[in-house]
Structure formats: C-alpha cells, structure tokens
Image (spheres, rainbow, N blue to C red):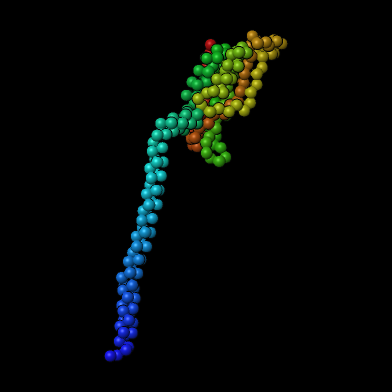
Amino acid sequence: MNRRAPVIAGVIAVAVALLAVFLLVLPKMGDVTTAEEELQTAEDEEVALAAQFDALQEAQAAAPKTEQEIATIDAQVPPTADLPSLFRLLQGAADRSAVDFFAFTPGTPAPNAAGTYSSIASQVTVSGGYFAIDEFLFLLETLPRAAKVTTLAVTPSGAGSGEITTSTGTLQLLVTVEFYTTDLSAGPGSIPGPSEITGTGA
C-alpha cells in the first residue's frame, strides 16, 4: 500500500475545501455584506423620510399661523405703493384722534440701494389740540402699514401772533414719514405716481 495515498487524499480534501470556500462561501459572504449595506442604506432612508414626514406635518399644522404672519407682513409692506389705501389709513387716524386739519403729501417711491424694497418719503401735517396731536402720533406709530418717522416738528398754530400754547391750545404737527413697498418698479412715472391728497377731519 502506498503511504503517500492518505497525504494525497488530505491535500485533495484541503484543496476541495479551499475551492468550496472560494466558490461558495466567499461569494455568499460578499452577498451578506452587500445585503447588510443595502439594509443600512434603507434604514437611513427610512429615518430621513420619517424626519421629512414629521417636518411636513409640523409645517401643515403651522400653516394657518404662517399664512397669517405672511398676510400681516404683506399689509405692513404691500406689493404696491397703494397710496389711496395709505391715505385712508391716515385719514382714519386723523378722524379717530379728532384733529382739526389733516394733509398728506406722498413722495415719489424710490428703491433702496440693495434693491429689496422701495420707500415712499411723505409729509403729514395735522393741527389740533395737544391731546389730539398726541393721539394722532400714537395711531401713526401703530398703523397696520410699516412707517418710520424721520423728522418731527410741533409748533404753535398762532406762533406768528405771539400766542402762548398750552395743553388746550392749537398746535401744528409736521412729520416726514417713510412708508414701504416691495414693488421695485415704483418710481417716477409709475402708477400711482407722486401726488398730493389733502383732506380735513373733524
């Protein structure tokens, strides 16, 4: 009997085992690794989709509040100059404060340097008693439309005649105030363009 036969058989068995490992086990291990990576990718995508879904639900729940905030901003800085509406706001403030006289002279809308909005530098003149003037200033500060007072002057209506002004005397208020619009095409030749609207209030 050949003594090398068991050795040769062992070598063949090892070779077959190694061949089986290379042909069967290693590819399966690669498939398992690929499957694990695909599973991890799917789990990551699921987490991301769940986060997006939660964000969409939160956005849907907050939509009414967001729409209200947008509407408020649009009212404060409207998409057009809308001078007639602005005049009505100021006229309403004059009526509520019971001033004796009210005049509104809007300026020409001018885009700002950054090109993000247009400002309308305007003059507002009112006259009346101290408390009426004070109330008008308060209403001007709390208008639904955004406004910025740049200059303010209060003088006695009868200053030229030497009248002494008291809390019950007549005063004249002249303010320069800026209003705003997101309309960047506003300017000379626009509609509505520069105009003066004057009215009187009780």
Residue lying farthest right?
Answer: 162
Q: Is residue 187 above or below residue 52?
A: above
Instruction: Name the residue at 35% across, 66% down.
Output: 29
Q: Is residue 120 above or below residue 201?
A: below
Quarter in which the N terminus is drawn = bottom left
Residue 98 position, x and y percent, is 55, 12
Image quadrant of residue 22? bottom left
Of residues 56 and 38, the one nearer the viewer is 38
Does residue 68 appear in the picture of this structure? yes
Of residues 149 and 58, the one nearer the viewer is 58
Instruction: Name the residue at 49% across, 35% down.
Output: 182
Image quadrant of residue 23? bottom left
Residue lying farthest bottom?
Answer: 1
Q: Is residue 190 left or right of residue 159?
A: left
Q: Is residue 176 left or right of residue 117?
A: right
Q: Is residue 76 left or right of residue 154?
A: left
Q: How many numbered circles does the render carry?
A: 0
Residue lying farthest left?
Answer: 1
Residue 3 position, x and y percent, is 32, 89
Of residues 185 and 134, the one nearer the viewer is 134
Residue 64 position, x and y percent, is 41, 31
